[in-house]
Amino acid sequence: MTEQATPSPEAIKAWARLMRVSRQLIEHAEEALKEGGLPPLAWYDVLHELAEVGEGGLRPFQLIERTLFAQYNISRLLARLEADGLVEKLPVADDGRGQTIRITAKGRDTRRRMWSVYGRSIAELVGAKLSVDQLNMVSALLGRLRHPPASD
């Protein structure tokens, strides 16, 4: 039987703050999007990834890797995005069952409108509360917690 590690009080405090602050920041950003009559933040994440890769689009498994959504969540989300005309599904030539997901012009416009609200939320909730040095420090520390660690 292996010995279980017990977290230090400092690790517990850091974890609890990280979870609470993360939840609060996301809730505030979600509320701002809702007040603006815009879709939820998850929609932005998918539209952003698709816009970043351009006309080639992404396969669903690539979106899962980039966004960390569960497969069943991404399937439902893509169905809603497609129904709203924000993405389109294209067949993959060498894979009869495969699909590539590509953002539409309407999806690009929705992403831009969402960013105007989401970006403002980031500026108000994080950027206005910490100095540039503090922001760089938080970013570096959180990068160390990622798996694999972020190098940027």
Image (cartoon, rainbow, N blue to C red):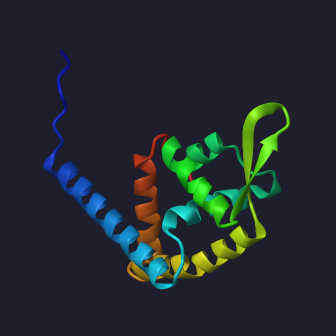
Residue 128's spot in the image, x, y percent? Answer: 43, 83
Residue 94's spot in the image, x, y percent? Answer: 84, 31
Residue at 62% across / 48% down in the picture?
63
Specify the farthest residue to the right. Answer: 93
Determine if residue 150 is in view: no
Determine if residue 4 is in view: yes
Left or right, 90 with respect to 10, comes to right
Specify the farthest residue to the top. Answer: 1
Q: Quadrant of the N terminus?
A: top left
Left or right, 45 with respect to 121, comes to right
Residue at 73% across / 42% down in the picture?
99
Q: Is residue 5 above or below residue 27?
A: above
Residue 39's spot in the image, x, y percent? Answer: 53, 72
* Total numbered circles: 0
Residue at 61% across / 54% down in the picture?
78
* Of 90 and 63, the residue lying toward us: 90
Q: Is residue 122 above or below residue 142?
A: below
Q: Is residue 151 above or below residue 93?
A: below
Answer with the quarter of the image where residue 134 lies.
Answer: bottom left
Answer with the quarter of the image where residue 113 lies.
Answer: bottom right
Residue 23's spot in the image, x, y percent? Answer: 33, 64
Left or right, 59 with respect to 15, comes to right
Q: Quadrant of the C terminus?
A: bottom right
Residue at 68% across / 65% down in the picture?
86
* Of 18 and 105, the residue lying toward us: 105
